[in-house]
Amino acid sequence: GGAGGVTPMAFNDLYLWSHDPPIHTLSIGAARPEDFDEHVEAAMLLPRARELVEPVEATLRDMMVRELGQDWVSGWWRGCPGCYTNDAGVHVAHMAWLWSLCKAWGMFSYAADRYDNIKGNTTAWDDSKTPDENRAGWGFVPGTQLRPGTLEAVEAAFAPDAPMKERVMAAIQELHAWLSAENRDEMLAKLEDMGMASAYDLQPWVPYPERNRG
């Protein structure tokens, strides 16, 4: 088992099931029957959920506060514009959240995948259309990446009393510098020094779509 006596997958399940309000349904990307085994084992630990989850959760929270400061953790999102409330459609809150995960927990690969999820919206954005016309084409994942010429629109959309405006603006620009396609290879070579290299691979096998590449 992992920290706290549970594996990362079991921690995920138990954290969600013991959340207030509770999350009662999990979507599991199973590729074979035995991929359900760990989730069944986690369900059997449900009576001990808080006992197992709280020490791990406390450690993760402490790491974030130590790296980012209590003021950031407690309210970086206050007054922060959403992708539907700034005329550039930039997903500011999503980007600031991904930046936090990178800085506190070194989750570069996770952040890169999530940032790539809004790349399609970014390339499809047409400045000749209104913001609402562009947003109408968004699917399940809304928002765009940071784009040239969008900083002014993003900054103008913050609430006047947003306490972390300057830090959020700096964070989203740094995240984009890390994760933009033109910088990605350079960043991958620096991950070890930045404390963002993957510690281990949770996949026990190579997923089918990734086989026989190259």
Image: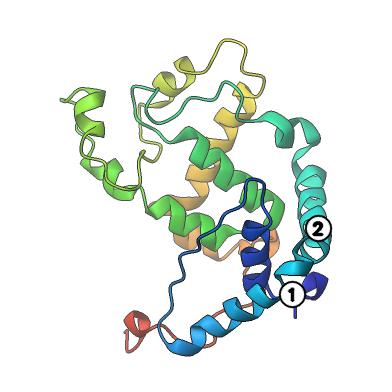
State left or right for residue 139 relative to residue 51. left
Q: Quarter-wise, where is residue 72 in the image?
A: top right
Element class at badge 1: loop
| Residue 133 falls in image quadrant | top left
Q: Pick whichever, 151 or 53, lies toward us.
A: 53
Q: Horizontally, is 22 left or right of 154 in the view?
A: right
How far across and how far down the image is residue 127, in percent?
21, 27
Counting from the top left corner in percent of width and height, residue 116 is at: 39, 54
Q: Position of residue 20 (x, y in %)?
A: 67, 46
Identify which amino acid the numbered label 1 is placed on.
Val
Residue at 67% x, 59% y is 15
Q: Earlier in the sequence, mark 2 or mark 1?
A: 1
In the rendered image of this protein, does residue 157 appear above or below residue 191?
A: above
Q: Which residue is mark 2?
A: 54
Q: Where is the N terminus found, in terms of image quarters?
A: bottom right
Q: Is residue 31 above or below residue 174?
A: below
Which of the 4 image quarters holds residue 44?
Answer: bottom right
- Which element carries disc 2, helix, strand or loop? helix
Label 2: few (<14), some (14–19) or many (≥20) C-alpha neighbours in 10 Å: some
Q: Which residue is the extreme one toward the left?
A: 128
Query: Vertically, is 124 above or below 60?
Result: above
Q: Nearer the viewer, residue 9 or 187?
A: 9
Total count of labels:
2
In-front residue for pair 204/198? 204
Q: Residue at x 66, y 52 (%)?
A: 19
Tell me the tag on residue 205. Answer: none
Is 58 located above or below residue 85 in the figure? Answer: below
Looking at the rendered structure, which numbered label has been put on residue 6? 1
Residue at 67% from the left image edge and 49% from the top image edge = 103
Estimate how packed mark 1 is, as few (under 14), some (14 to 19) or many (20 or more) residues with alpha carbons within 10 Å. some
Where in the figure is residue 25, as x and y percent of width and height?
A: 50, 60
| Residue at the image position 65 percent from the left and 24 percent from the top | 164
